Image (tube, helix red, strand yellow):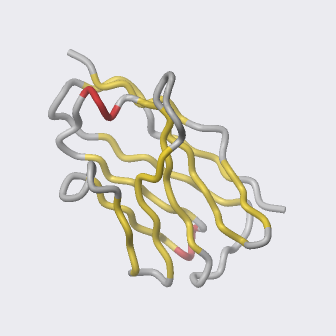
Amino acid sequence: QVHLVESGGGLVQPGGSLRLSCTASRYIFTDNAMGWYRQAPGKERELVATITSGRNTNYADSVKGRFTISRDIAKNTVYLQMNSLKPEDTAVYYCNADLRPNIYWGQGTQVTVSA
């Protein structure tokens, strides 16, 4: 069993930045992917970014060049640095740990981009 706790969401103006953090309750091997997903009102949950083996990353086209995912193995924490935020980035952001066959999710953190 793994518990994931997100933090760092909030209200920010367009063009601003936020950094999300997700801390796991135990060590997660680097071969296991961790990632961030988001869900806007009335929309499906979608992939934002994933990271495996410390440096292998994958991003949604909509966030490439603006968001950066990183991982601190010693702290069991994954981060999402979000720059140049846009109103369409507004959503609840969820942390994910892929420990197949089990998939774990955090409770979500709200990010609102508005003037």
**In which quadrant is the C terminus drawn?**
top left
Q: Is residue 52 above or below residue 76?
A: below
Residue beneath the point at 46% across and 71% down: 51
Residue 71 percent across, percent down from the top left:
46, 69
Q: Is residue 31 above or below residue 97?
A: below
Q: Considering depth in this image, is 52 or 6 the residue closer to the camera?
A: 52
Residue 92 percent across, percent down from the top left:
50, 33
Q: Is residue 108 above or below residue 23?
A: above
Residue beneath the point at 41% across and 52% down: 48
Residue beneath the point at 24% across and 58% down: 64
Q: Is residue 28 left or right of residue 55?
A: right
Residue beneath the point at 23% across and 37% down: 85
Quarter of the image where one finds residue 54: bottom left
Residue 82 percent across, percent down from the top left:
29, 47
Residue 68 percent across, percent down from the top left:
30, 60
Q: Considering depth in this image, is 67 or 59 the residue closer to the camera?
A: 59
Tally the numbered discs.
0
Q: Considering depth in this image, is 45 or 112 the residue closer to the camera?
A: 45
**In which quadrant is the N terminus drawn?**
bottom right
Q: Residue furthest right?
A: 1
Q: Considering depth in this image, is 62 or 115 the residue closer to the camera?
A: 62
Q: Residue furthest top?
A: 115
